Amino acid sequence: MASTRWIPVCQWCGKQGSITNSANEFPPRSTPRIQGKCPSHPSGDKNANHAPQWEKR
């Protein structure tokens, strides 16, 4: 069985985090994380965290 690759991607700026492999088609249970601050946060706050979501690769 082939593994599925998942990557966290910020929904506001598109920055990507580290790829994670999963043995099935379901996204990892862990919360996706991206380091740094999001320059495109809707509040305009340049010190706001990213809002990552898992995307299949």
Image (spheres, rainbow, N blue to C red):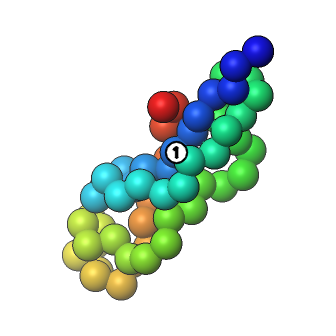
Instruction: Identify the residue at image location x=42%, y=66%.
Output: 50
The amino acid marked with disc number 1 is: Ile
Categorize mark 1 by other alpha carbons within 10 Å: few (<14), some (14-19), many (20+): many
User: Residue 12: horizontal and vertical position, in percent?
Assistant: 31, 56
Judge whether 34 appears above or below 56 on screen.
below
Q: Which residue is at 41% across, 54% downward? A: 16
Is 3 rendered above or below residue 21?
above
Q: Residue furthest front?
A: 2
Q: Which residue is mark 1?
A: 7
Residue 30 percent coordinates (x, y)? 72, 52
* Residue 52 visible to an observer of this rendering: no
Q: Give the camera-side residue of 9 and 2.
A: 2
Q: Secondary structure at mark 1?
A: strand
Left-right relation of 7 to 10: right
Query: Is 43 on the left-hand or right-hand side of 34?
Result: left
Figure quadrant of residue 24:
top right
- Residue 41: percent from left, percent from top: 29, 68
Task: Pinpoint residue 10: horizontal percent, then vertical percent.
Answer: 40, 55
Quarter holding residue 22: top right
- How many numbered circles are shown? 1
Q: Identify which residue, 3 or 44, lies in the foreground.
A: 3
